Amino acid sequence: MNDNILQIQNPVLSVNRLSIAYGKDKYAVKDVTADVKRNTITAIMGPSGCGKSTLLRAVNRMHELYPNIKTEGEISLNGESIYGISTSKLRRKIGMVFQRPNPFPTLSIYENVIAGYELNGNKLKRSQKDEIVESSLNDVGLFGEVKDVLNKKGNFLSGGQQQRLCIARALAFKPEVILMDEPTSALDPLSTAKIEDLLVELKVNYSIILVTHNMSQAARISDYAMFMYLGELVEYDKTKKMFTNPRDSRTEGYLTGKFG
Amino acid sequence: MVEAILKYFITDKIITMNIKKESAIHDVISHFEDYANLILNQLSILEKVIGSGSLVISEEIMKEMNLNEDKSDKFEIKLSEKIVNTIVLQKPVASDLRKLMACYQIVINLERIGDLVINIVRFIPKIREAETYNRMSEVIYNMLLVSVNMVQKSILSFINGDKEFAIWTIQNDVVVDEMNHKLIKKAIAKSKLPDETQQLLFSFIHINSIISNIERIADHATNVAEASIYAMDGTDIRHQHHINDENQ
Amino acid sequence: MIDANDNSKWREFKNKLFFRVVILLSGITISPIVLIVFHLLVKGYKQINFDFFTKVAPDTLQAMTAVRNGELIPGGIANGISGTLLMVLTASVMAIPVSVAIGIFLYENQGKRYTNLIRNLTDILQGVPSIVLGLIAYIWIVKGVTHGFSALAGSIALAIMMLPLIIRSTEETMKMIPVSIKEAGAALGVPYHKIILKVMIPTGASGLTTGILLSISRVIGETAPLMLTTLGSTAINLDITKPTSAVPLQIWEFYNNPNMIDLVWSSSLFLMGLVLTLNIIAKRISMKYSGNS
């Protein structure tokens, strides 16, 4: 057991001895144990191929989309195992935002926000839908910009706006946890800054887990940070501690640019 | 030989990952080493002056020390600037950041050491009692030696990453503190002056300490003001009043 | 200095020469289409009138009388148009769901051995001569099901011809949709079959439509398989178990009758127009949506 791992009370997410392998013995994630604190931004950092994306996707079981995946260990959301409920239900409680903004191209902005319900065949009254759309777009600061063009398709929106639309789409379910896989790597600095500010606002109501290869971003906005290397969780601590005085020499090496 | 070559290649690989950052930090540290050597040099001149036991300091020596003090001021400003630039441009974290922050603090302290050296040599010619001074100069010299040794070891501990030296320095502070308390009192007690005079002397000494400390409060306030101007304007105006003093 | 000058003049000349050769060759390539359309227009426009689309083909006597009197041949190709429509529609209803499904199947199972096998079989199917497919439909349907020539048999033959085209274009269209769209659907908890139906297919709709339109335009003019399966009819027939006419079949019939020559041109013009229109629409759709997925 690793001493460099944080202990947290009443975590929103709990990972216990999680190992994930592709095919035979190709472990992407090795024996990871960690608890995520509620209403914080937790960053997962590490060099390419360290398993951070795989770990993130395991939380909402998206890693099962890959062939030949073998999973050992447990993950629980608020104490309840994520393998005990259907993936449909799970992914309502745990939303995900991807690196490239991916609004559905054939749906309008309105339809995109409500897509989670519509595509799953959930019938809602028009007034309920309107409320969800307005509140989600407001949460991401997009409502004012698009309220007159809700019925247009989203492809005229800028990259940053599209990404915020995707976040609104994830928020429509009012999930507990939002997973973000390098959400700003495809965006320009100004859009990145806007989304970072948004995340800091959102953490009041949601718990955010953010995979990023941008150390400065992790330093800027995360409260807690995990450092992964070659599939292992090397260190997990408060961000300001990890960035000023990391305990493991591998973390130190990564942060000071000795490898990456 | 093989090791050296291997080390070259390995270090080469590490440095190529962050050429600008590594060279910026390296630049700061090497300037720091030059500064440290300047101060140590200044201290060794002081050792000679006090070791001689004489109240007369040659013009040559005064000139050299004043020149060094000038350079010291310039070094402080230059190094502070380099450190700030490195932090803002290279965004160092973890041990890199700590090294630079420590360096910044150390530079401020080295500059004060330099100031104190100059203050000491300014006081020496003001003493009228040559004999008294001569008698005490040995003890003063010993105290200086210990202090200089502390400066050397503490600087080395930073440059070489040697914790032993740092610990030794911190532990020796007690020794010097005691010397500070005891030296004058012993000297006065040993002199064959009447008791009242001795008491008077003690009182003056204490009053002098009080006044000196008040003066240091004012000094520190000045430092705060200089820092405040740096925050607002980005210009480092430290030591300009020293220059004004010298012109007077 | 002198060398540089010489070289650039030579290069400019080469440029112009090449450009002109390319224009010439392009012209030669386009000219058959232009000549054909022009020829058809000139020869066929006379017979195109309202009757052309609404009346059935005349019999030999009527045609002979009209030609002798220098009049327009009465009647039209309504039976052919209705037959073509009936059979193409039936073929589409049979072929489209099957081939779209196979196309999606191939897309979902890339790299597996049976996927490559199926894809190869599809390519082979595309190369089978249309008359052979007609023979197969004859044996299966004419002999086996409807015990006689029928539109159904024709539709089956046409459907088999449509399969490879639609399968391939579906697979290619699906491949062009970014994976992130699928992931977005999955992350919202949408089950896989719904992602395909509600997200992937709508997103790839333009590509799929283009493939379908192109395959329709391919089979609409097929003659040989129809000759062995639907035989033809003088009346408008909407019963798929009975023999039916079709525009290409009628062109063949008119060709064989010296009195109906004029109708040959007009029907060919019609058919050509139909095919060209379908192709242009397909092209327009694919260009309009090429930015989207």
Image (cartoon, coloured by chain):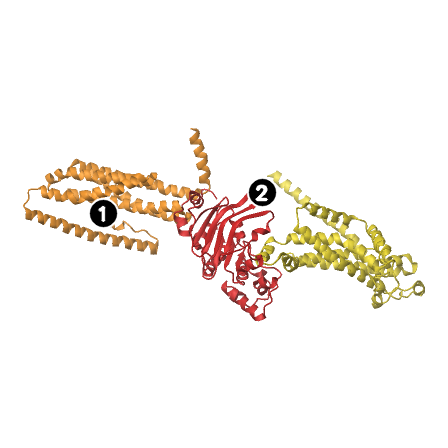
Chain colours: A red, B orange, C yellow
Q: Which residue is the site of mark 2?
A: A24
Q: Chain of mark 1?
A: B
> With respect to residue B95, does A194 lie above or below?
below
Spot occupied by residue C178 in the image (x, y as percentages of width and height) = 61, 53
- Residue type indicated by callout 2: Lys
Q: Residue at x 39, y 48 (%)?
A: A244
Can you name the residue that lies furthest to the bottom here? A127
Q: Residue at x 31, y 55 (%)?
A: B229
Residue A41 is left or right of residue B41, and the answer is right
- Residue type indicated by callout 1: Glu
Spot occupied by residue B195 in the image (x, y as percentages of width and height) = 6, 47
> What is the quadrant of the N terminus of chain B in the image?
top left
> With respect to residue A213, does C197 lie above or below?
below
In this orientation, does residue A184 appear?
Answer: no
Q: Tell which tag, 2 or 1, sits nearer the viewer.
A: 2
Residue B114: quadrant of the picture: top left
Spot occupied by residue B128 in the image (x, y as percentages of width and height) = 11, 42
Q: Which residue is the site of mark 1?
A: B246
Residue B195 is left or right of residue A205, and the answer is left
